[in-house]
Amino acid sequence: DIRQSDRVKQHIKQLDDIEIGEQYHLLDGNKMTNLGVLWIGTAKQRSRICYPITVQYIVYDDLENKTNKLEWRDNTLNPKELLEDIMDKAVELTYSYEMPNGLFRKTVRYYNENLIRELLVNCLAHSSRTISNDITIKVYPGYVSISNPGGLPLGVTKDNILHTKHRRNPNMIEILTAFGLMEGEGSGYDLIYELDAVEAKKQPEIESTFNTVTVYQSAEITDKEVVRLMDYVDHNYQLSQKNKIAFGIIAREKRIATTDLSRTLQLSAEERLRSYVDNLDKNHLITKGGATKGAYYQVNPTLLANTKSNIVTTLKTIEPYVLKALIKEDLHSHPMSKISEIASRIPDVDMKEIRKMVYSMVGKEVQKKGARVNCRYYLI
């Protein structure tokens, strides 16, 4: 496999077997290292390692009863063979939706094959080899969770994992990179975010404890029309990975504040956000409204018209003067209301937008009575 890889330099391919083994830390002189045992050892040799790679795959129904369970505990497979065997036998991960697409039908898997492969490769690359635990794949009706031994490395959190790089097992990563199973420079979650954006799914949620990292990935397509819109944009515009991620999030949310978009993309400065959205703005795929901290992005209505997209109309994209009129009409019918009560009657609009508008109306069109959580509003 090393000699056939297009990622390995020619001078390494020309080495003999022992030299290649030493190059990739599989051999130390005439003995195998622990890494070497994982890759080229026998099942008996792998079983002597304190914590070899073991995997559990469990499927649950709506009542959380187990309907299928597979285990890989016999140590007969090396990491690459193990990955391929899981991808082959985990049939519940291959289920898909079918959506009408003109005269044809478009198939979208519950879980993109490349996304599942990336999550499993991350488990192989970043698992702690000093903790006794299985890589565990749990499939529920609406989502999948994948856990691997060892918490997130020092300095990496669920809120910076998209941009913070750490190589826990660099020698394992070097081999997986040579095989083309991972990029090596830590771009795995960029790919995961891109695949979720293109298929109108929510980004994965991550939980980390001292012993385990668990990733939860939803199977739900939030809006089928967004999938068609993403397909149209992908075929008609030259977009980078960052552009696709940002556009997918904006299309999925209908309208999103720049601060919320930065938070979703785990960015700390607006300058960094520009690399995600500038090309979208230049190609008129999105429009920007508001200013400073009140700025927001939404999909360009002209683009929706050109693609004949039937994206559901929502109050999320409402103009400020229309929102003000709605709030005045609501307070006319329901005087002495809390902001939370107003928001419950205008459910599509973000609570923050309603709160900001009500505050701006106080002393002009609206008066308030009470303080803090008991504050109620009525028309002057």
Image (spheres, rainbow, N blue to C red):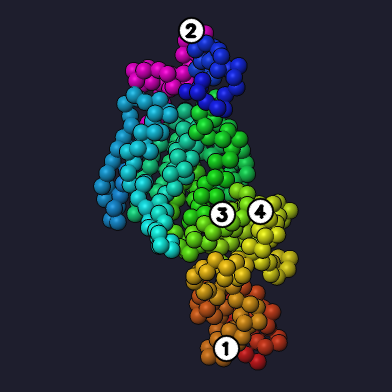
Where does label 3 land, which residue? Answer: 234
Q: Which residues are magenta?
A: 27-54
Between 44 and 116, the one lying in front of the other is 116
For the residues labelled 3 and 4, the Cα–Cα distance comes to 15 Å
Q: What crowding class fits label 1: few (fewer than 14 Cα within 10 Å), some (14-19), or many (20 or more)?
A: few
Where does label 4 land, which residue? Answer: 276
Nearest-to-viewer mark from 1 and 3 = 3
Query: Residue type at mark 3?
Result: Asp
Q: Is the C-beta separation of discs 3 and 4 under 8 Å? A: no
Query: Residue type at mark 2?
Result: Asn
Identity of the residue drawn at 55% across and 86% down: 330
Where does label 1 land, which residue? Answer: 329
Quarter in which the C terminus is drawn: bottom right
Image x and y of residue 188, in percent: 55, 41
Rendered view: 13 above or below 240? above
In primary-sequence order, the first of circles 4 and 2 is: 2
Mark 4: secondary structure: helix
Where does label 2 land, which residue? Answer: 30
In primary-sequence order, the first of circles 1 and 3 is: 3
